[in-house]
Structures are given as C-alpha cells and as structure tokens.
Image: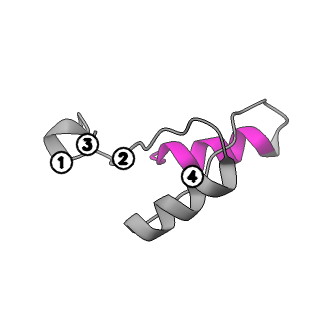
C-alpha cells in the first residue's frame, strides 16, 4: 500500500486509532487558515512520497 501520511491518518481514524488533529493544505493561504482553525502551536509538514522531505524541498 502506498499512502501519504494524511491518507494513513484517515484509515487509522476510520478504525478508531487515536490520531492528532490535522488539516491538509495546498497553498500558503490554506496553511494560515488551517493554523487559525487548529489554534495553539501548529506544525507544517510536507507530504511527499520520496525518501526525505528535505530532498524534495520540504521541511
């Protein structure tokens, strides 16, 4: 099975596995809106299906 992390979270939630709140965002504007919606301290994480987010330009 080849899933992005956010897709795996959805599967875990479906079967009752506890997961932290998260929102997928595609633009900087969506990231800001998601951070406001979640409140508190937030983390932005790139979702890439390659070895190493840093190599793909993410953090």
Q: Position of residue 16 (x, y in %)?
A: 85, 35
In the shown orientation, is residue 51 left or right of residue 36? left
* Residue named by callout 4: 35
Magenta stretch: includes residue 49: no
Q: Which residue is at a point 44% across and 46% down the rendered structure image?
A: 2
Q: Position of residue 5 (x, y in %)?
A: 50, 42
The colour scheme used here is one colour
| Quarter of the rendering containing residue 42 | top right
Q: Secondary structure at mark 3?
A: loop
Between marks 1 and 3 in the image, the one whose residue lies nearer the viewer: 1
* Residue named by callout 2: 46
Q: Which residue is at a point 57% across and 52% down the rendered structure image?
A: 35
* Residue named by callout 3: 50
Q: Which residue is at a point 18% across and 48% down the rendered structure image?
A: 57
Q: Position of residue 59 (x, y in %)?
A: 28, 39
Marks 4 and 3: in contact by CB < 8 Å?
A: no
Between marks 3 and 4 in the image, the one whose residue lies nearer the viewer: 4
Q: Earlier in the sequence, mark 3 or mark 4?
A: 4
Magenta stretch: includes residue 2: yes
36 and 24: which is toward the camera: 36
Q: Earlier in the sequence, mark 1 or mark 3?
A: 3
Which of the numbered marks, if any, corresponds to residue 57? Answer: 1
Q: Secondary structure at mark 4?
A: helix
Between marks 3 and 2 in the image, the one whose residue lies nearer the viewer: 2
């Amino acid at each position: 099975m080849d899933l992005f992390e956010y897709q795996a979270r959805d599967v875990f939630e479906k079967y009752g596995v506890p997961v932290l709140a998260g929102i997928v965002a595609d633009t900087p504007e969506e990231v800001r809106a998601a951070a406001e919606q979640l409140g508190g301290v937030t983390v932005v994480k790139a979702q890439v299906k390659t070895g190493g987010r840093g190599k793909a330009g993410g953090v």
